[in-house]
Image: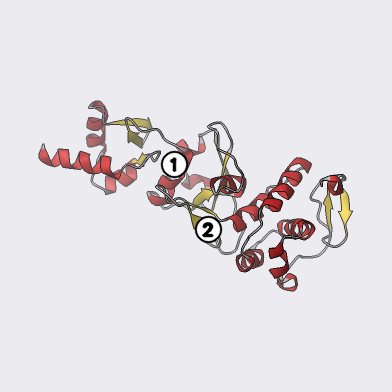
């Protein structure tokens, strides 16, 4: 009984706010399903789904879920694009419970637990936008050191996700807010970026906004491909970057 009591204390000590436990991780830590069922029956933990648990007085968050996927299951999934920018405080914005939470994932869908894929508030984009999968990732400061995209990586991911004029305008406004991006990291990300559309659109917007860091980029080293790219359907054509942009773009300011 003393040993079981210690194991329970250790389990509760391991628990972080908002972070669930996956059964496979707990099994490796010496907690078989039979013991977990006993803890559930005693009211110490609760079952969120098959093979997913959390302390009874704790509630899972999306940040906590991704932290568990990173730390317990060693999956390469992380908050990205506008979600990462929000978590990093770029916009004075608090993520609401029903707000779309975007994560980029370098694993295959089959590697992601069903419980995660069925979460309606979590949108997973399975993509490898950069040659170097770890380039430009950072950790949140505070109680939950979650890996996520840095501001430099996140804005390129945001550009990558642009699909209409509204996205275009919001991305332009975000770039206006990013006054102190790191030129060297941006350069390396642009060199590693696999999407010609993303690189062209980002450079167009960055040049138009005229942030100081834009002048630190070596444009000649960045491969922009050949031929035009349609960013916005029925838009106007920009000859320098060979992309289509919204017809009312020059009225944004």
Mark carried by residue 137: 2
Mark carried by residue 65: 1
Q: Is residue 169 above or below residue 34?
A: below
Q: Is residue 201 left or right of residue 56?
A: right
Going from the N terminus, do you reach mark 2 or mark 1 first? 1
In this view, the residue in front, 38 or 135, is 135
x, y percent for residue 108? 52, 49
x, y percent for residue 57? 33, 30
Question: On the image, which quarter does residue 165 sit in?
Answer: top right
Cα distance, mark 2 to mark 1? 18 Å
Q: Is residue 253 left or right of residue 222?
A: right
Residue at figure coordinates x 86%, y 49% from the top left = 250
Q: Is residue 63 left or right of residue 190?
A: left
Q: Is residue 146 above or below residue 57?
A: below
Mark carried by residue 211: none
In this view, the residue in front, 57 or 115, is 57
x, y percent for residue 205? 76, 55
* Other residues around mark 1 within 10 Å, as few (<14) / some (14–19) / many (≥20): some
Q: Is residue 190 above or below residue 127?
A: below
Q: How many marks?
A: 2
Residue at figure coordinates x 26%, y 35% from the top left = 36
* Other residues around mark 2 within 10 Å, as few (<14) / some (14–19) / many (≥20): some
Residue at figure coordinates x 62%, y 67% from the top left = 188
Q: Which quadrant of the figure contains the N terminus?
A: top left
x, y percent for residue 30? 23, 46
Q: Is residue 239 above or below residue 57?
A: below
Q: Secondary structure at mark 1?
A: helix
Q: Is residue 69 left or right of residue 188?
A: left
Q: Secondary structure at mark 2?
A: strand
Between tags 2 and 1, which lies in front? Answer: 2
Mark 1 and mark 2 in contact (Cβ < 8 Å)? Answer: no
């Amino acid at each position: 009984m003393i040993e079981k009591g210690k194991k329970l204390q250790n389990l509760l000590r391991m628990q972080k706010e908002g972070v669930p436990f996956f059964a496979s991780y707990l099994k490796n830590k010496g907690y078989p399903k039979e013991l977990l069922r006993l803890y559930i029956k005693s009211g110490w933990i609760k079952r969120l789904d098959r093979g997913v648990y959390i302390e009874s007085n704790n509630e899972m968050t999306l940040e906590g879920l991704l932290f568990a996927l990173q730390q317990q299951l060693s999956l390469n999934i992380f908050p990205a694009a506008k979600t990462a920018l929000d978590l990093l405080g770029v916009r004075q914005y608090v993520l609401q419970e029903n707000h779309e939470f975007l994560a980029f994932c370098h694993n295959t869908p089959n590697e992601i637990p069903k419980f995660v894929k069925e979460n309606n508030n979590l949108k997973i984009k399975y993509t490898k936008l950069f040659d170097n999968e770890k380039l430009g990732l950072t950790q949140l400061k505070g109680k939950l050191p979650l890996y996520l995209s840095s501001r430099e990586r996140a804005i390129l991911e945001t550009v990558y996700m642009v699909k209409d004029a509204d996205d275009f305008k919001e991305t332009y406004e975000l770039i206006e807010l990013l006054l102190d991006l790191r030129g060297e990291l941006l350069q390396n990300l642009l060199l590693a970026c696999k999407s010609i559309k993303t690189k062209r659109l980002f450079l167009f917007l960055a040049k138009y906004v005229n942030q100081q860091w834009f002048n630190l980029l070596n444009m000649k080293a960045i491969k922009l491909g050949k031929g035009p790219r349609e960013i916005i359907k029925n838009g106007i054509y920009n000859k320098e970057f060979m992309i289509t942009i919204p017809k009312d773009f020059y009225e944004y300011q």
